[in-house]
Image: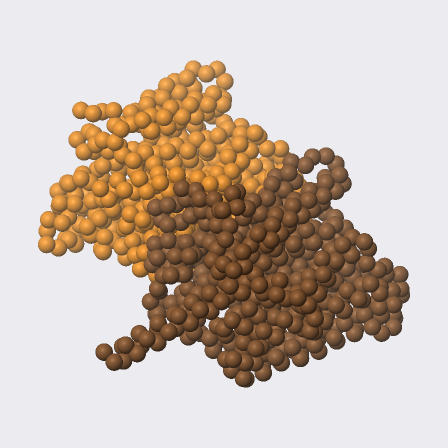
């Protein structure tokens, strides 16, 4: 009973599994090591570019006026148990598919010269990772989602552990065990929901009424998993370690896509499926979000390692996202989604900026730099654009998301908005401080005097990110338009559920 | 009398004796021919198992049904894979005698008899045949002190467990008046309340079988015997001889004692939780990979028991899928361990695996697949076994079991991925000797099954469900 979507062919499955074709080709490469490495780079680049082109097709053929799933595919898998291979994208997930497939070829390019050992295996790991990420955003079956969600761990663990920095073993183990511990609790929630609804079809689960007491437990179990992934304070500590030790491209994917998985989980499961528990935990989530924003911003201010600083800033930005999601209003959730996308682009770009000078100097120590503007004007310009975007300067991608979230937060609570906006002030402080120490000033170190500006390959990596950052900042409706209908439905669904609860309470009070 | 219900067992038994004769007439003491013949006999038995119609036979002592067939397929697969492993290992260790595969064959006959047992007496006969062959196999490297020790230790402790089991059977017989599974339920439910003697009998039967499963607290022998026995024997012990007692346990507890599930459930829960905890925590400190696998198998039996605890059809289905994935992962992991040889000697510490990804990427990748699968990471096979048993526990409201299960799997995950870490991230140790094609074959076959199990999940679940249905009539 396979039903294939209206497009006539399984577009989403194609986008998801196309990178695996690249993996198969990579596995069959033979010859001398240098030749294999070069062929592996090109194979990975072409298969990821092809995947990106296919996902652009999703974007262009996506109908933004529909709030439900599009391009749906459904194949019976375990029909007796209500499990199916179900794929589909709605406004919430469509752009993440685009983000993931866009960042992967950039990662391949960014690793072109910096990865010299076991290039083929590295590229295979990245393509497998791409399949897992895209599959996770496309899955409309909870079990399928879980499989992709967990499957991401395997290639990422290997990427950090094999091609990472000096403390890579510690960082990769910590990354794996933290996220795995969270995920198994989500597995319990999955089993309970499966048992209750008799299916793992997300569109059915959305309309299943879970009893309030059960919702609380389910919410907590899902929170354990998503909070680690977001990451939310206080379970964020794996992130700085993983970021610092991961190779540049690993950091890019980690910040660009993997961090979005947790927040995506909130939007896909916690909020729409467990509306009462989500409302119950709203203050807790706000508190954790605000703490993340202020505390990790302060921590970022004190960092001497560039990657660590950006890693902490990621935690702060994701705190804003969490606040936005749990405002349960259109502005907040739109803002959160936009912030996720813009952070995906901007933080990825910032890690690439660090990678550029790390490749040249092999240090991420801020104190080792200074005065780069003299020698690397193009780099200074690019870095400045992304710094501004990270701060949230109007006209760049970062502004729209934060602004919308704060508007949403204002509608809920003045103090929430005030504390949330403190993050913007602190963000400006640590980013400008970083930029000043690295780019401005006089060149004091001899080895910096010979440093080279961006190569054409690096320009090619940054060009799409620069365009996107400005595009998202200047004309955000091309992106908000995609998800407006879906978030609108989400907000409406939540309001309806809350009204139903209120009526029930009212009916209960006056029998 | 419909004697043909036992045709696969009869065929295997006769084939075993014929192969023994051929072995004696051989000029050279060589195991290759007899191993090939045994593999042929396994293949023949496999076909016969699939063709045997469902029926009860021998005056209610023996039964052939979908449940037994499912178990027999697993047992034969486990036996065949490990027999292939023994080919090269035994030759290199200088213990390649023709009796080795024949002993495996007789043990397999015993296990198949257990799977088809319809009476406690048949069960005991099968169990003893299985165990007697394994005592000899464990001590097969007779010039090796550790192997002799393993054989002796297994013999003494296993004899004790057999005694317990026999005692339990005699108590059950004494209080119920019958040993046939078909008649036990009336005897059990006939009285207004279950007699204490019968309960003690059930407890002893469970204890005897739990020993064979190496479930806590009857696990003490496992690490030593696993470490001491020749690696193919360890591989054999951790696959088929785990399946047979488990399916017997399922058949006995769900069938004749299904009505008193409230009485045996706490025992199973306790054994399961203890096995999961010990299996995950005690493995962390191990430096010998065979000992680590011993604790790992203790843990796996604990997870599989989670599926038995609810006593539901969905739980039995989960256990059957779990056993299927477990046999594949275990055979594959031991194939990798058999491949660990350096300068003609078998090495077996985890440190010997250091940097394997640099010296032998295919082997490292295969072992990585097995380790991730044992840790229960989707989309590998091991995940689905865990998924089903935990689902059964959740459906029955056994939350403590499910929660302890997932948390211990995080702990267990630590030592599984530590092996991956050693292989991929550490500085390389000297390369291993070249592998025999037979070892590569087992590793690749099991690896492909583990990796692509997700594609055959539907049919596999269907087969397990059909088998589970038999027990619930």
Q: Is residue A113 above or below residue B113?
A: below
Q: Which chain is brown?
A: A
Q: Position of residue A101 (x, y in %)?
A: 62, 52
In the rendered structure, the answer to whether residue B132 lies left or right of residue B453 reads: left
In the rendered structure, the answer to whether residue A227 lies left or right of residue B22 reads: right
In the image, B112 versus A339, the foreground residue is A339
Query: Chain B in the picture: what colour?
Result: orange
Q: Position of residue A417 (x, y in %)?
A: 56, 80
Q: Position of residue A13 (x, y in %)?
A: 53, 46
Tell which residue pokes out farthest to the bottom in this image.
A415
Q: Position of residue B83 (x, y in %)?
A: 46, 30
Which quarter of the image is occupied by the N terminus of chain A? top left
In the image, A214 versus B288, the foreground residue is A214
In the image, A152 versus B38, the foreground residue is A152
Q: Residue at x 25, y 46 (%)?
A: B254
Q: Is residue B305 visible?
A: no
Which quarter of the image is occupied by the C terminus of chain A? bottom left
Q: Is residue B56 visible?
A: yes
In the rendered structure, the answer to whether residue B206 lies left or right of residue A93 reads: left
């Amino acid at each position: 009973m396979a039903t294939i979507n209206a497009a006539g062919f399984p577009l989403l499955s194609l986008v998801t599994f196309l990178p695996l074709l690249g993996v198969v080709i990579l596995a069959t490469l033979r010859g001398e090591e240098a030749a294999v490495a070069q062929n592996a780079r090109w194979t990975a680049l072409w298969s990821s570019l092809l995947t990106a082109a296919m996902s652009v097709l999703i974007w262009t053929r996506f109908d933004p006026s529909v709030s439900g799933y599009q391009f749906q595919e459904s194949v019976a898998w375990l029909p007796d148990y209500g499990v199916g291979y179900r794929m589909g994208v709605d406004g919430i997930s469509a752009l993440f598919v685009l983000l993931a497939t866009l960042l992967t070829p950039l990662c391949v390019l960014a690793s072109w010269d910096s990865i010299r050992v076991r290039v083929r295996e590295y590229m295979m790991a990245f393509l497998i990772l791409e399949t897992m990420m895209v599959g996770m955003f496309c899955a409309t079956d909870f079990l399928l989602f879980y499989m992709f969600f967990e499957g991401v761990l395997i290639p990422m663990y290997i990427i950090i552990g094999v091609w990472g920095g000096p403390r890579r073993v510690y960082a990769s183990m910590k990354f794996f065990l933290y996220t795995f511990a969270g995920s198994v609790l989500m597995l319990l929630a999955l089993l309970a929901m499966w048992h209750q609804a008799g299916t793992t079809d997300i569109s059915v689960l959305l309309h299943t009424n879970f009893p309030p007491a059960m919702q609380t437990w389910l919410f907590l179990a899902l929170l354990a998993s998503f909070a680690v992934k977001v990451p939310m304070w206080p379970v964020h500590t794996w992130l700085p370690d993983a970021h610092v030790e991961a190779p540049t491209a690993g950091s890019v994917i980690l910040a660009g896509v993997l961090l979005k998985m947790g927040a995506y989980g909130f939007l896909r499961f916690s909020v729409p499926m467990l509306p009462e528990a989500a409302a119950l935990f709203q203050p807790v989530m706000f508190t954790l979000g605000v703490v993340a924003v202020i505390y990790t911003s302060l921590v970022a201010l004190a960092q001497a390692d560039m990657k660590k600083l950006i890693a902490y800033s990621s935690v702060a930005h994701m705190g804003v996202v969490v606040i936005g999601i749990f405002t349960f209003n259109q502005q907040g959730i739109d803002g959160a989604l936009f912030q996720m996308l813009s952070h995906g682009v901007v933080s990825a770009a910032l890690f690439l900026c660090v990678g550029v000078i790390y490749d040249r100097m092999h240090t991420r120590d801020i104190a080792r730099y200074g005065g780069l503007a003299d020698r690397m004007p193009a780099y200074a310009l690019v870095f400045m654009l992304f710094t501004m975007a990270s701060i949230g300067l109007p006209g760049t991608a970062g502004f729209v998301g934060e602004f919308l979230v704060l508007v949403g937060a204002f509608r809920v609570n003045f103090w929430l908005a005030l504390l949330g906006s403190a993050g913007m002030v602190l963000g400006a402080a640590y980013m400008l401080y970083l930029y000043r120490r690295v780019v401005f000033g006089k060149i004091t170190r001899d080895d910096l005097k010979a440093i080279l500006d961006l190569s054409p390959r690096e320009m090619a990596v940054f060009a799409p990110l620069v365009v996107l950052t400005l595009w998202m900042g200047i004309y955000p409706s091309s992106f908000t338009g995609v998800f407006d209908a879906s978030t609108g439905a989400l907000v409406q669904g939540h309001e309806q559920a809350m009204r139903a609860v209120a009526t029930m309470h009212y009916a209960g009070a006056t029998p | 009398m419909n004697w043909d219900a036992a045709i696969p067992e009869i065929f295997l038994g006769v084939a075993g004796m014929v192969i023994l004769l051929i072995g004696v007439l051989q000029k050279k003491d060589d195991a290759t021919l007899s191993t090939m013949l045994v593999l042929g006999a396994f293949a023949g038995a496999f076909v016969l198992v699939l063709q045997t119609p469902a029926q009860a036979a021998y005056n209610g002592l023996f039964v052939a049904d979908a449940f037994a067939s499912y178990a027999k397929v697993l047992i034969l697969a486990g036996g065949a894979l490990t027999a292939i492993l023994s080919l090269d290992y035994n030759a290199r260790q200088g213990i390649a005698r023709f009796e080795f595969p024949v002993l495996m064959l007789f043990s397999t006959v015993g296990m198949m008899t257990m799977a088809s047992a319809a009476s406690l007496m048949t069960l005991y006969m099968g169990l003893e045949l299985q165990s007697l062959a394994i005592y000899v196999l464990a001590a097969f490297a007779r010039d090796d002190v550790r192997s002799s020790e393993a054989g002796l230790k297994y013999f003494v402790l296993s004899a004790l467990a057999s005694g317990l089991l026999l005692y339990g059977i005699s108590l059950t017989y004494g209080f119920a008046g019958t040993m046939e599974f078909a008649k036990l339920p009336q005897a059990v439910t006939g009285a207004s309340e279950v007699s204490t003697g019968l309960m003690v009998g059930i407890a002893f039967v469970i204890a005897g079988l739990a020993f064979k499963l190496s479930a806590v607290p009857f696990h003490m022998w496992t690490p030593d015997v696993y470490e001491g026995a020749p690696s193919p024997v360890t591989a054999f012990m951790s696959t088929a001889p785990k399946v047979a007692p488990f399916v017997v346990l399922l058949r006995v507890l769900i069938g004749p004692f299904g009505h008193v599930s409230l009485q045996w459930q706490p025992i199973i829960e306790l054994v399961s939780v203890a096995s999961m905890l010990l299996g995950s925590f005690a493995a962390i400190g191990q430096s010998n990979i065979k000992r680590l696998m011993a604790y790992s198998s203790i843990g796996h039996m604990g997870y599989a028991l989670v599926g038995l605890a609810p006593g539901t059809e969905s739980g039995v289905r989960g256990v059957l899928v779990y056993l299927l994935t477990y046999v594949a992962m275990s055979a594959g992991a031991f194939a990798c361990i058999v491949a660990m040889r350096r300068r003609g000697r078998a090495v077996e510490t985890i440190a010997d695996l250091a940097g394997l990804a640099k010296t032998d990427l295919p082997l490292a990748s295969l072992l990585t697949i097995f380790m991730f699968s044992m840790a229960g990471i989707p989309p590998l096979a091991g995940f689905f076994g865990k998924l089903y048993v935990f689902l059964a526990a959740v459906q029955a409201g056994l939350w403590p079991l499910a929660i302890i299960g997932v948390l211990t799997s995080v702990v267990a995950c630590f030592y599984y991925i530590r092996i991956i870490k050693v292989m991929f991230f550490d500085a390389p140790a000297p390369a291993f000797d070249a592998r025999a094609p037979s070892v590569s074959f087992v590793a690749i076959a099991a690896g492909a099954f583990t990796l692509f199990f997700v594609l055959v999940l539907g049919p596999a679940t269907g087969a397990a469900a059909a088998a589970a249905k038999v027990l619930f009539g």
